[in-house]
């Protein structure tokens, strides 16, 4: 007649199918289960087997001689198995229906017969008849509850996969905000899926395996995302550094370092294969952060050295050194993250201005001497050009004296009147 069974008590029939009290040929029902899958209910019938409706066609799969049909309602699926059905080999026939693929469940309980009906999302319908009056209300309630929880978890995981696929693409596109939003949404969905799994005690382990797999993917994506973003920021920092935009360079290097530190910590926690490479890249970024903090002051010092090493008056080198030192002075006053003494640099600027005025004076004197030579040789055009050059240097020296109060502008005004004109 069949009815309810205990899966652990189903005897294993002989491999030749000769056992008169066998259920499935050559194996126990529990052999079908993997991992933490476990049955909540097990039903059986002796000869009715399974009715399979597919469209307008109905197929009856009956058990072989001395075997039975079994329906196992587990924490992961409904498993229907028919013992010794295959006519050629006598092997078992079975169909597995995960709860995410089941559309509905119905049960009928009569005086002489009962029936469990499962309808798949493909519209295939499976009837499992039982002899006698078998109350299946608890079976139906369990399956409905399992479908509800499994579908709820599956939908959240599907949405999480969609968000997960956008994280790296957003990072590659240089949109970290969109990537962060996608990450937060993915994490929320995984947490929600975990809450649903916890509410379905019978399926917690099975559901959590799927959740954990996606959680691992999210962690690996997060590692790659932090590393990719760190590289992008480091490249941007290099560009800013090459343009002497040290504040932006330091900000990008610092943020890149933070990204690499996150990637390295996650990589170590998960034993990520490239943790060594990430640590090496992090060390390089840390070195760049230290270098860029001292680089503005060193650049100012190098500009001063270049001006001192000039063989000619080279007022343009002194002008460049003054500009670099002035820029560095302003940076040190605004941002304490950079190394250097702004007060010492202020005195350096005064010294540079004085040397710049001296360079203009020497350049003016050389230009006047050339002009006098050209005038004596009768080359009026060349003389005029030399005198104009001299006046330009004197005017620049005068302007510097007025701007920085490092000299006497009147002195240069007097000098302008002494520059000769060609005859």
Image: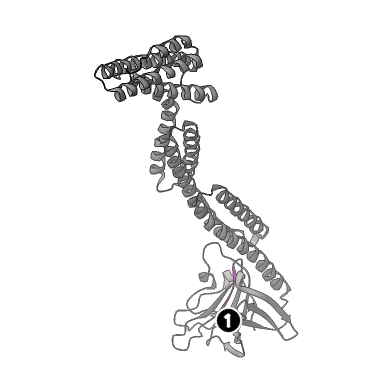
Toward the front, the furthest residue is 423
Which quadrant, please, contains the N terminus?
Answer: bottom right
Confirm whether residue 343 shows in the render. Answer: no
| 46 w.r.t. 390: above or below | below
| 79 w.r.t. 374: above or below | below
How is the model colour-coded? one colour
Query: Which of 294 and 123 lies nearest the eye of the viewer?
Result: 294
Q: How many marks?
A: 1
Which quadrant, please, contains the C terminus?
Answer: top left
- The picture places residue 342, in percent across and down from the top left corner, at 49, 18
Q: Which residues, given as a range, are shown in magenta?
A: 73-80
| 156 w.r.t. 90: above or below | above
The answer to whether residue 412 is left or right of residue 307 is right
Toward the left, the furthest residue is 377
- The picture places residue 191, in percent across and down from the top left corner, at 62, 53
Magenta span includes 76: yes
Q: Residues within 10 Å of mark 1 (few under 14, many from 20)?
A: many
The answer to whether residue 60 is left or right of residue 246 is right
Toward the bottom, the furthest residue is 57
- The picture places residue 49, in percent across and down from the top left corner, at 59, 85
Query: Which of 355 and 377 lies nearest the eye of the viewer?
Result: 377
Confirm whether residue 181 shows in the render. Answer: yes
Magenta: main secondary structure:
strand
Question: Residue 113 is drawn in which quadrant?
Answer: bottom right
Picture residue at 54% right of the left edge, 70% below the top: 30
> Circle 1 sits on which residue?
69
| 236 w.r.t. 153: above or below | above
The answer to whether residue 307 is left or right of residue 7 is left
- The picture places residue 163, in percent across and down from the top left corner, at 57, 57
Magenta span includes 360: no
């Amino acid at each position: 007649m069949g009815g309810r069974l205990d899966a652990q008590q189903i005897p294993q029939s002989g491999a030749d199918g000769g056992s008169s009290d066998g259920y499935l040929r050559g194996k126990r029902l529990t052999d079908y289960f993997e991992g933490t899958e476990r049955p909540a209910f097990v039903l059986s019938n002796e000869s009715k087997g399974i009715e399979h409706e597919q469209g307008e066609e109905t197929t009856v799969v009956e058990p072989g001689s001395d075997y039975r049909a079994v329906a196992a309602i587990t924490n992961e699926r409904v498993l229907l198995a028919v013992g010794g059905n295959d006519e050629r080999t006598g092997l078992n026939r079975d169909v597995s229906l995960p709860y995410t693929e089941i559309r509905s469940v119905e049960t009928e309980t009569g005086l002489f017969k009962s029936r469990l009906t499962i309808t798949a999302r493909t519209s295939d319908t499976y009837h499992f008849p039982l002899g006698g009056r078998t109350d299946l209300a608890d079976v139906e309630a369990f399956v409905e509850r399992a479908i509800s929880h499994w579908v709820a978890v599956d939908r959240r995981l599907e949405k999480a996969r969609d968000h997960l696929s956008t994280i790296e693409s957003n990072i590659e596109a240089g949109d970290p905000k969109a990537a962060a939003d996608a990450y937060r949404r993915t994490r929320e969905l995984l947490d929600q899926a975990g809450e649903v799994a916890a509410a379905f005690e019978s399926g917690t382990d099975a559901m959590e395996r799927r959740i954990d797999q996606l959680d691992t993917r999210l962690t690996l994506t997060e590692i790659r995302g932090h590393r990719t973003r760190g590289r992008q920021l480091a490249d941007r920092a290099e560009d800013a550094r090459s343009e002497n935009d040290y504040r932006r360079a330091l900000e990008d290097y610092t943020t890149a370092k933070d990204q690499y530190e996150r990637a390295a910590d996650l990589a170590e926690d998960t034993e990520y294969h490239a943790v060594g490479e990430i640590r090496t890249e992090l060390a390089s970024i840390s070195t760049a952060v230290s270098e860029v903090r001292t680089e503005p002051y060193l650049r100012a010092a190098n500009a001063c050295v270049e001006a001192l090493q000039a063989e000619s008056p080279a007022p343009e080198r002194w002008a460049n050194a003054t500009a670099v030192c002035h820029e560095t002075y302003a940076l040190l006053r605004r941002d304490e993250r950079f190394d250097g003494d702004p007060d010492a640099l202020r005195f350096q600027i005064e010294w540079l201005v004085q040397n710049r005025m001296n360079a203009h004076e020497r350049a003016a004197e050389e230009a006047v001497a050339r002009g006098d030579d050209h005038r004596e040789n009768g080359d009026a055009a060349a003389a005029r050009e030399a005198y104009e050059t001299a006046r330009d240097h004197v005017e620049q020296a005068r302007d510097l004296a007025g701007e920085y109060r490092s000299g006497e502008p009147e002195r240069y005004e007097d000098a302008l009147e002494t520059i000769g004109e060609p005859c």
